[in-house]
Image (spheres, rainbow, N blue to C red):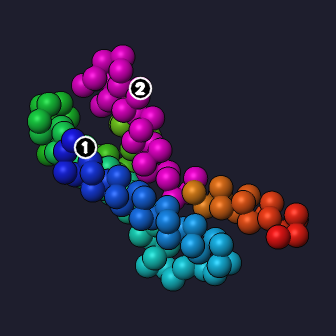
Amino acid sequence: MDITLRLAKLTAAFCSLVSVVYVTTASDPSPIVALMLSFGPLLAVILWLQKDARRTGVGSVHDWGYFLLLAWPVVIPWYALKTRGRSGWRLTAGLFVLILSAYISAVAAVYFVWFFHLSGY
């Protein structure tokens, strides 16, 4: 496993944990923390994709990282299918889960808090 992919996973896990803490304590994060929770996993995935693109030679555009940042929902599936073939869908799904992990965790925590609030615990 590549060190930057490990860093992307750690970033996603940390942002997920922090978003769950904010949801369960019913507090609003400061703007800089909200920005980190929103864009931290995306930036970590983009850094990994830049390094992987250098390794594979695909996407050797000068502004590859900026292009990824602007159009990541379209570019990530294209890149994954171009470099991995049919198994690229697994990579696409994994990267999308990493990018959206803070949102997924926050929504799960909201339902968890709501369920226990209604049941009286």
- Amino acid found under the numbered disc labelled 1: Leu
Is there any visible trace of residue 119 in the rendered image? Answer: yes
The image shows a total of numbered marks equal to 2
Please name the residue shown 36% across and 16% down the image.
Answer: 86
Looking at the rendering, in which quadrant would you find the C terminus? Answer: bottom right
Q: Secondary structure at mark 2?
A: helix
Please name the residue shown 24% across and 25% down the image.
Answer: 83
Image location (x, y in percent) of residue 12 = 41, 57
Q: Pointer 2: residues within 10 angstroms few (<14), some, or many (20+)?
A: some
Q: Secondary structure at mark 1?
A: helix
| On screen, residue 70 above or below 53 | below
- Amino acid found under the numbered disc labelled 2: Trp
Residue 47 falls left or right of residue 35: left
Residue 49: mark in rendering? 1
Label 2: which residue?
Answer: 89
Asked whether 15 falls inside the magenta stretch, the response is no
Q: Looking at this rendering, what residue extends furthest in the front direction?
A: 121
Residue 39 falls left or right of residue 65: right
Looking at the rendering, in which quadrant would you find the N terminus? Answer: top left
- Disc 2, disc 1: CB below 8 Å? no
Along the line of sight, the residue nearer the viewer: 66 or 28: 28
Quadrant in the rendering for residue 93: top left
| On screen, residue 62 above or below 24 | above
Q: Earlier in the sequence, mark 2 or mark 1?
A: 1
Asked whether 100 falls inside the magenta stretch, the response is yes
Q: Which residues are magenta?
A: 79-104
Q: Looking at this rendering, what residue extends furthest in the top direction?
A: 86
| On screen, residue 75 above or below 121 | above
Q: Pointer 1: residues within 10 angstroms few (<14), some, or many (20+)?
A: many
Image location (x, y in percent) of residue 109 = 65, 61
Judged by its main secondary structure, the magenta piece is helix
